[in-house]
Image: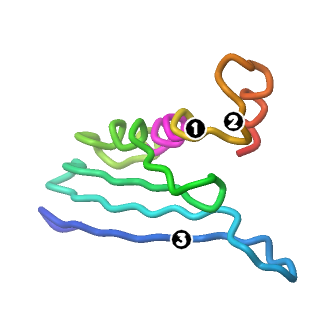
Amino acid sequence: MQASATDAASVATTTRAADDWPTLGLAVALRVEGSGVKEARLVVSAATNVPTRLAAAENVLRGATLNAATLARCADAATSDVDRDGFSEAEGDCNDYNNAVY
């Protein structure tokens, strides 16, 4: 990227079934200055009841250099922002299963 740039993208995946509804949507907007992320906005949809901002994942990216390790931490943080099927942290094993699957 340039010394200072803002980029945004969104992607949706589907099951490619006859009733082809999106199964996951992700919108990302990043402002990069030099080699670091100055600002980040991430929103997940389709897999959630309502579009959900991924604040913990945004915090991981903000101020970080984009590399594989940062993106792995970002993915881990994103799971903490999403309530899947009503599972809560108190449900332990079920939530661990969903984190591994999703």
Res. 99 mark: 2
Residue found at x 29% / y 69%: 7
Secondary structure under the numbered disc 3 in the rendered image = strand
Residue found at x 18% / y 66%: 5
Query: Pointer 3 and pointer 1: residues touching (CB < 8 Å)?
Result: no
Q: Which amino acid does label 3 sit on?
A: Val
**Residue 95, percent from left and from top:** 72, 28
Identify the image quadrant of residue 47: bottom right
Frontmost residue, 74 versus 48: 48
Query: Pointer 1 and pointer 2: residues touching (CB < 8 Å)?
Result: yes
The residue that disc 1 covers is: 79
Q: Which amino acid does label 1 sit on?
A: Thr
The mark nearer the N terminus, 3 or 1, is 3
Indicate whether residue 82 is drawn in magenta: no
**Main SS, magenta residues:** helix
Q: CA–CA distance between discs 2 and 3?
A: 21 Å
56, above or below 27, in the image: above
50, above or below 68, in the image: below
Q: How crowded is mark 2: few (under 14 residues within 10 Å), some or many (20 or more)?
A: some
The residue that disc 3 covers is: 11
Identify the image quadrant of residue 82: top right
Frontmost residue, 12 versus 72: 12
Count all numbered tags in the image, as a single digit: 3
Residue extending furthest toward the right: 18
Q: Which amino acid does label 2 sit on?
A: Asn
The mark nearer the N terminus, 2 or 3, is 3
**Residue 40, percent from left and from top:** 30, 51
Give the magenta range.
71-79
Identify the image quadrant of residue 56: top left
Residue found at x 71% / y 36%: 86
